[in-house]
Amino acid sequence: MRTPPSILTDTTTVDVDRSDTGYDAWVQQAIRAVNADAQRTADTHLLQFPLPAEWNIQLYLKDESTHITGSLKHRLARSLFLYGLANGWIRPGVPVIEASSGSTAVSEAYFARLIGVPFIAVVPRSTSSEKTRLIEFAGGTVHYVDDARTVSSESMRLAEETGGHFIDQFTYAERATDWRGNNNVAESIFRQMAEEPHPEPTWIVTTAGTGGTSATIGRYVRYTQRATRIAVADPENSCFFDGWLGGNAQERCETPGRIEGIGRPRMEPSFLPSVIDRMMKVPDAASIATIHALQARMGRMAGGSTGTGLWAALRIIAEMRSRGESGSVLTLLCDGGERYVDRYYNDEWLAEQGIDTTPYRAMIDELLDA
Ligand SMILES: *Cc1c(COP(=O)(O)O)cnc(C)c1O
C-alpha cells in the first residue's frame, strides 16, 4: 500500500532554516540594554532665551548638550544602534565602525560599550589628539587614514575584513530615526511647548550635518499637520545651501568648513531638501559672534553650530518684529562650548582665521537692546 504524501517530507519544496536563537537572545539583551539606558535618562531641557517681554515673541533652545555624551548625536547614535540591531547588522564580538572624528563617534562608542561590542572610529590622520582622546575615553578605538577622502571606503573595507558593521551616519541618519514620534526630538519639542504662549513655533531652525535633525523635524510637522515652518542655517564652505537652492543633488564644495558638526562637501543621503522651507547661508563670524552673545546673555557656552542656528533664529525674530508679528521661534543648542575653548572662544585662533565677530555682535546687541 502506498503511504499518503506528506507535506513534511515533500522534496519539491526548497526549505532553508537559518534561525539563530543564540543571536536572537543576544539582540534581545542588547536592545534591552539600550532601552534601559534611555529609561535611566531624563529628557533634555527646553531653555528660554531672554527677549523683551513686550515683543510677545518667545525664543527657545532645545538643549541637546545635556545628553550623557554631550550632543544631539546621542539621539542619532541610539537610533542607529537600535536600527542596526533590529536589522541584524550588529553582531556580538565584531566591531561597529564609523567614519567620524567628532560627536557621532563619541556617542556611538558609548552605545557600543553599553551592548559590549568593539567600536572603531575611522578618522583622518590630521585629527587632533583632543578629539581622539574623547573617542578613546568613551571606549572606542581610533583607526587613521592618510587621505581624509577615504574614511568611508576604509570603513567599508574594515567592516568586510572584520565581519563588522559600518553604521554610516550620513546614509542612515534620516531613516533610523522614528519619524512619526517615539520620543524623537520633534515629539519631545512639541510636548515641552504645550503650555507656552505660542505652543506651535512659527519657525523651527536647525543646522545640517547628516541632515537627520531637519528631516526628522520637517517630516514630523507635516505628519502632525502643524503650521510650523522649517529653516536650515548652513555655514560657509558647505554645499547644502546651493544644493537645496538649485535642486542639485550633485552639488560639491571641497574647502573644509570651520563650524564643527555641520556643513558638508556633498549632498549627503540623509539631507532631505523637500522638507525644508527656507535656508540661510550664515557667515562663520556671525555664528561665532552669536555663541559669544549666548554666553553673555545666558551664561552658557555652546559649539559653533548652535551659533549658526541661533543667528538665523534671531534674524527671523527681527523680521517678525519688523512686521509686528508675535509668535515663537525654536532652535537647538547642539553641543556645549567646552570642547571649543581653544577655537571659538580664543581670540588668537579667531585672529589667525581672520574672523572678526565685532560687526555681527553689534547687530545682535542692536536687535536685543534697542
Ligand atoms: C551633527 C551635528 C549637527 C547637525 O545635526 P544633523 O542631524 O546631523 O544634521 C549640529 N551640530 C553639531 C555639533 C553636530 O554634531
Image (cartoon, rainbow, N blue to C red):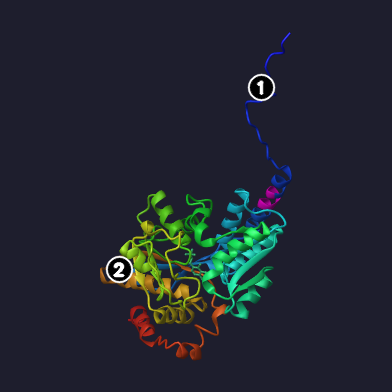
Say which residue appears at 54% left-offset and 69% top-offset. 150
Q: Quadrant of residue 203?
A: bottom left
Under tag 1, what secondary structure?
A: loop
Q: Which residues are magenta?
A: 27-32
Residue 158 has which mark?
A: none
- Residue 74 picture quarter: bottom right
Q: Earlier in the sequence, mark 2 or mark 1?
A: 1
In this image, 162 relative to 339: left or right? right
Q: Give the residue type that dot 1 points to.
A: Ile
Point out the image quarter for the N terminus: top right
Q: Mark 2 near mark 1, Cβ–Cβ under 8 Å?
A: no
Q: Please indicate, yes or no, whether residue 137 appears anywhere in the rendered image.
A: yes
Can see residue 327?
A: no
Examine the structure image and report whether residue 30 is included in the region drawn in magenta: yes
Q: Residue furthest left?
A: 323
Residue lying farthest to the top in this orientation:
1
Which residue position holds label 2?
Answer: 320
Q: Is residue 230 above or below residue 361?
A: above
Q: Residue at x 48, y 54 (%)?
A: 187
**Residue 96's x, y, as percent?**
64, 60
Q: Quadrant of the C terminus?
A: bottom left
Specify whether tag 2 is near ligand 1 (CB below 8 Å): no
Q: Position of residue 75 (x, y in %)?
A: 56, 60
| Residue holding disc 1 | 7
Q: Main secondary structure of the magenta part?
A: helix
Q: With 204 as the anchor, is 129 left or right in this view?
A: right
Neighbor class of circle 1 (other Cα within 10 Å; few <14, some 14-19, many 20+) is few
Q: Amino acid at mark 2?
A: Met
Number of other residues with Cα within 10 Å of mark 2, as a class: few under 14, some 14 to 19, many 20 or more: some
